[in-house]
Amino acid sequence: MGSNRAVKITVRVIVIAYLFFLVGWPVSLVVQNTFADGFTALRIALADPSVVFSLQLTVAVALQAVLINTVFGVGISLILVRYDFPGKRLLSSLLDLPLSVSPVVVGLALILVYGPRDSWFGQWLTEHGIDVIFSPLGIIMATAFISLPLVIREVVPVLTERGTDEELAAASLGAGPVQTFWRITLPAIKWAVVYGVVLTLARSLGEFGAVKIVSGNLEGRTQTATLLVEQTYQDFEQSTAYATAFLLAAVSVACIVVVTFLQKDHASAGRGKGTS
Amino acid sequence: MSIEARNVSKRFGDFVALDDVSVSIPTGRLTALLGPSGGGKSTLLRIIAGLETADSGSVHIAGDDATSLPPQRRNVGFVFQHYAAFKHLSVARNVAFGLEIRKTSKEETAERVNELLDLVHLRQFADRLPSQLSGGQRQRMALARALAVQPRVLLLDEPFGALDAKVRKELRDWLRRLHDEIPVTTVFVTHDQEEALEVADDIVVINEGRVEQIGSPSALYDQPANEFVMGFLGPATRLGSELVRPHDIHIVSDLPPEEGFYPGVVARAARVGYEVRVDVILDDSLQSSPVHVTMSRAEAHPLKLDVGSRVWLRKPAGATALPLGVDAANAPHPGAGPIAHYTI
Amino acid sequence: MPTMTSTPPNTPPAPNNHASQRSQRQTQRRIRRAARATGRPLTRSSSVGLGIAMIWFSALALLPLSAIVLTTVENGWEKFWGTITAPQTLAALTLTTSTALLVTAFNVVMGTAIAWVLVRDKFFGKRLLEVVIDIPFALPTIVAGLVLLSLYGPGSPLGVNIANTRIAVGLAFLFVTLPFVVRTVQPVLADLDKDVEEAAASLGASRATIFRRIILPSLAPAMTAGAALSFARGISEYGALVLLSGNLPMNTEVGSVRILSYLENGDNAAAAAVATMLLMVSLAVIVALDLVQRRVARRG
């Protein structure tokens, strides 16, 4: 069995080396670049009002997108799993579409429907005092679009696996639909929802392409953190770029770590490991 | 001897799966490795197949030392409890697998596959995927697949364990008939004593990593070597200072003319199908636990066994009996474990 | 994470041997249909819920995406063909597609190897690898570009500078598509029965043969699904390339950048034409995933 072991070690070394050169080292370099002069870069960046604004905007947008996608995601998952209706398969396939559509295409699509000029609804909405494009509303929509399937993809497998026995039992004991949802269904899908929310949050904080198109990238008004990274890097304010990038990377890596560790503890509600 | 396992030991961490086990399996026979789960019987089978390596000891198959051979080169057929079907291959391709590995010509492979599918009555399902078969059909396919390569020995690990009772019984009879047709040396693992008694030519009783007894089904049933074997192969109950089979006990309701009867009172009488089961409390303070007695309905009827009836019990001459150990005599249940393992 | 969605119901075993094959197949189909239709018909409150959800989903996604296709259709075949065959756009689409294909092919091999290590290997720090694999999925794409630039751009500690080259495009694709094959193959590999491999071994199959004839076919659907996701993600990438590839026309420019520059020039029709191309690929991927899942369901 010697050759078997040799193959195993070789594959292990190749995999570790590949991941180190593709992800590990580059990511750690961003940390290193950020802290090249200790906390100075971070302090200077956080003293810049446009940086602070972009971070606040990013967080506000991400939270709203997460809220929308959580409510929508849990609702549509329940309907998809528990009810039958014509077009169910099609809908469930279409819900995956945002995962494979280019962010730039998403941005363009929103412009074509809600843009200020030559769009389907843009002019009508503007007349009624609602600006979608070049305003935070558009940024929220773009972000919600991009991260739409993440909660659904976590919740649907858990709901399917769980079945309806417990819900029927609760109903037979006299619980109404609302009580059943809060006391039976929600606790069952709790961890799936948490993973979905964390992943949605990570994705929302980092959206770039779609946001770049619909926001207009106006500094201090619609410039999110990712857009700021691009602009400052291209304006040769590299330390600000690295500092902001570091903050974004730190949050997203933290999200991943949280999910990975939660998952270990609640493997039964895991994100599809063991499904399919 | 087709299979010789000598002084085989195997540990998993602290757990001793096999402790210096030696077994010889004769050629052309159908042998059962019988014992409770976790007793080491599956481990022994897997060591014979080369799927597990023994810590010490040796395995010879058909006279060749196979101790350090990989499973690929042992030429044994192995059938798993959960079928281990190649899900992406049709039934025919599953059966053909081993032949293809051996670079058998296409025509010969096709011919042999058809032969085997006929043998296991799956010819009409040749082009199905395993997922389209029932459990019993899948296991027959697995058997055909193992037989296709004309193995020197056929090993089956709890082959009917995943099937429901009715199918299990059918397949069991079928395996016996199949073995009579193709007398390849076969070893199967089971924890079901009825299965072993019904199907096997020889039984090896394995418990806690040791061989308890080897012999033919009737030898094991009638002359058990110890309390464990007696209790594991069938019901047993204590009568005085001996362990006997409940259906061997002679029961009378009139005062017996001879000596050697134990007097007692019926504590419970229940009819289960064709059988009547009676618990008798002996007058003698020697034994506090009730004696279980079983008999046919026809035998029970004239005795008028109601709760509280006075009866006398005796072990007839020549019946299977095992003297109890000294310490067991004081225990409430002799040889604790699967003794008298019927429930009412 | 990019795993395959809901587990399809297992195909029930054939009911009995005696019935004719055709009626068996019909029965099976009926059972399968019944198994799929697990839900109840809509109640009044769930209809309202579905209605609200559909309005939001339409406003957010369906209407905008159909607007792209409709804009392309309105402007006619000539505009569409003219746009995507214009030298600069054609070069961008060719580069995007060929790079995405190459990267996907590489991912199928490497992703399977990574999944293999995660499932079958044991060593200190394996948990860390799990985190590392998910980083590209969560890291903002613009930051991903910056991250790669810091190791492979000007001032690289390795002394390589691939910024503004076609290699940079491939590297960015490799980074952002890393998790897809790994995360689709991993659960399938973890679920593989050890029995099946042992059965093959005792039938005489070598380790290489077992891998090729038993394991690989079982992983193939997951590998296909991962490849489809990886390809879709590759051709639609934008953020990771902005800082890294320089978007040089006729050289390192990709499809999504063409959409952006058409849009900036106010040529919505041309932007929509290129977007339609990308959208078609996305739809093809969705369809491919669905087909793969159905095949897996059939295999049970």
Image: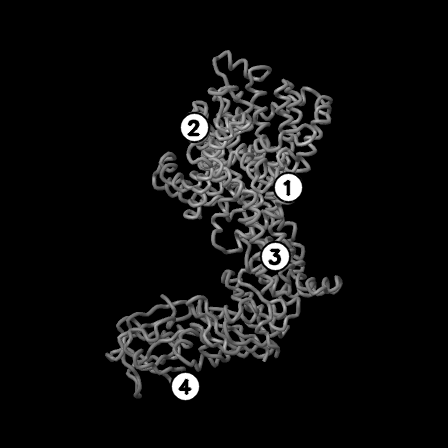
Q: Which residue is mark 3?
A: B86
Give the spatial CA distance, label 3 vs label 4: 53 Å
Q: Is residue C289 visible?
A: no
Closer-to-camera residue (A249/A76)? A249
Q: Are marks 3 and 4 on the same chain?
A: yes
Q: Nearer the viewer, mark 4 or mark 2?
A: 2
Q: Nearer the viewer, mark 3 or mark 1?
A: 1
How many residues crowd mark 4 within 10 Å: few (<14), some (14–19), many (20+)?
few
Q: Which residue is mark 1?
A: C103
> What residue is shown at x 31% (from left), y 78% (from top)?
B328
Q: Amino acid at mark 3?
A: Phe
The correct choice, above or below, for B220 with respect to A268 in the image is: below
Q: Secondary structure at mark 4?
A: loop
Q: Nearer the viewer, mark 3 or mark 4?
A: 3
Residue B235: which quarter of the image?
Answer: bottom left
Give the x, y percent position of residue C182.
Answer: 56, 46
Closer-to-camera residue (C102/C3)? C102
Q: Which residue is mark 2?
A: A44
Q: Nearer the viewer, mark 3 or mark 2?
A: 2
Q: Are marks 3 and 1 on the same chain?
A: no
Q: Amino acid at mark 2?
A: Ile
Quarter of the image where the C terminus of chain B is located = bottom left
Give the spatial CA distance, label 2 vs label 1: 39 Å
Q: Are marks 2 and 1 in contact (CB under 8 Å)?
A: no
Q: Is residue B151 visible?
A: yes
How many residues crowd mark 1 within 10 Å: few (<14), some (14–19), many (20+)?
many
Q: Are marks 4 and 2 on the same chain?
A: no
Give the spatial CA distance, label 4 vs label 1: 81 Å
